Amino acid sequence: MNNNVELERLRSDFKLIDDLMEQKHVLWLNENRNPHKNIEGITMEEVEDAANRLQRFSSYIIEAFPETALEGGIIESEVKEIAAMKKLIEGRRAIHIPGRLFLKCDHALPISGSIKARGGIYEVLKHAETLAIKAGKLSESDDYALIHREEMRDFYKQYKIAVGSTGNLGLSIGIISAKLGFQVDVHMSADAKDWKKDLLRSLGVNVIEYEQDYSVAVEQGRKEAAADPYCHFIDDENSKDLFVGYAVAALRLQKQLANQLIQVNADHPLFVYLPCGVGGGPGGVAYGLQQIFGEHVHIFFGEPTQSPCMLLGMMTGLHDQISVADIELTNKTEADGLAVGRPSKFVGSIMESILSGCYTVDDAFLFRSLKAMMEQENIFMEPSAHAGVFGPIQIVCEGQEYLEKHGLYDKMEQAVHVVWSTGGNMVPEEMRQIYLQTEK
Ligand SMILES: *Cc1c(COP(=O)(O)O)cnc(C)c1O
């Protein structure tokens, strides 16, 4: 749909498109949000099942990644209040953010330092379990530490895992798959940083580079994998396993909030802000949270001004039938994890009744936030992860309509805002210094 007539029609149907084309910071509110609507095609039993599977794998994870021993082989991050950062934002912007501000620290997830350590690792583990059980080498009641044995690595060697990625999913899949013994092909889009490719190659991963963006890398990977019966393709655009793996985060967050005596109910709304690329990570988390907290959770996705693919797909209802190029955006952003021009239809459809809205944020904000978070909280998060930080600002400055509609105005002082920090710990020191000195 690349012709001018279509674009003119879109612009007249959706007034926000002009602002998107001018790369303004926009807030789109989802008129179809309906927390009581039944979601088809996925259930919380499947999410519980995934949580149990990850529990079964915990003894293997401890063996293979000893740094996870303290947490019992469970890949999880803390929720941390960031009061100093909140104060800085309020001062700089001359605004008041009612309620408390927390950071969900997925930048510090063990093994691969990003939100992809949830879904990505989960899908590979599930595949590994299925293969081993089928071959009679494992049963659910075994101690899964046995998977770390050399004979199991030899078994997995005959199989291949493939994935297309802008970087972090490739890292996650590459690290866990190589550890298990699989052959791995990672199809990397042009946005992927060199250090990620170098790291993967050092682990014996076959990295295939593309000069095009994410959609092309995924498509190519999917094609090559389809031709090989021993190859399992991790489909970032369509995978339910990935989605379910991400959704486990919601069960964990529920416990973490309860442990910190943080209530979520009609008088204590929970706002969650998630950076969004193709949608799987934030979508999975959003699904889980919505199932648990219902109408009391308000979920917003943040995207770069050049890559608002989920916003565009959901607002128009066209999902993967529209790309940011169709509204003359470049999909060029330093937020490499979010450099996706076309959203997942699978995820967008599930989000139709769940999501509160989407907003856009420019790269300049991401770098200012990166520096401020380091100075105020001594926390390093990669540029993509800072798309979440803009959420509370956008709600305070532009969210009046939403707060009014949901009767939230007089409850906001009891609100809890959770900014989902999606990546950062794997970024090498030299890159961190470059990011810290970048001013856009
Ligand atoms: C992948 C990624 C996201 C977004 O996840 P999607 O599943 O692509 O929507 C956000 N932040 C970082 C750092 C990522 O790597």
Image (cartoon, helix red, strand yellow):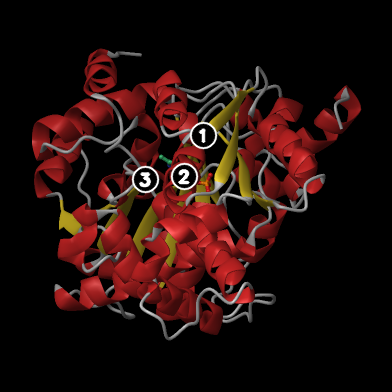
| Residue 9 point in image, percent of width and height | 84, 35
| N-terminal-most mark, 2 or 1 | 2
Mark 3 surroundings within 10 Å by alpha-carbon count, few (fewer than 14), some (14 through 19), many (20 or more): many
Q: Residue at image x 50%, y 81%?
A: 139
Front residue of this view, candidates 182 and 85: 182
On the picture, is 152 further left or further right than 130? left
- Element under disc 3: loop
On the picture, is 88 further left or further right than 166? left
Residue 172 visible in the shown view: yes
Front residue of this view, candidates 7 and 140: 140
Q: Residue at image x 65%, y 23%?
A: 329
Image quarter for residue 407? bottom left
Q: Is mark 3 within 8 Å of ligand 1?
A: yes
Q: Amino acid at mark 3?
A: Ser
Q: Nearer the viewer, mark 1 or mark 3?
A: 1
Image quarter for residue 104? bottom left
| Residue at the disc numbered 2 | 178
On the picture, is 307 further left or further right than 440? right
Q: Nearer the viewer, mark 3 or mark 2?
A: 2
Q: Relative to 166, is 103 above or below? A: below
| Residue at the disc numbered 3 | 114
- Say if mark 2 contacts mark 1, CB within 8 Å: yes
Q: Amino acid at mark 1?
A: Val
In the rendered image, which quarter contains the C terminus?
Answer: top left
Front residue of this view, candidates 96 and 189: 189
In the rendered image, which quarter contains the N terminus?
Answer: top right
Q: Is mark 1 within 8 Å of ligand 1?
A: no
| Residue at the disc numbered 1 | 205
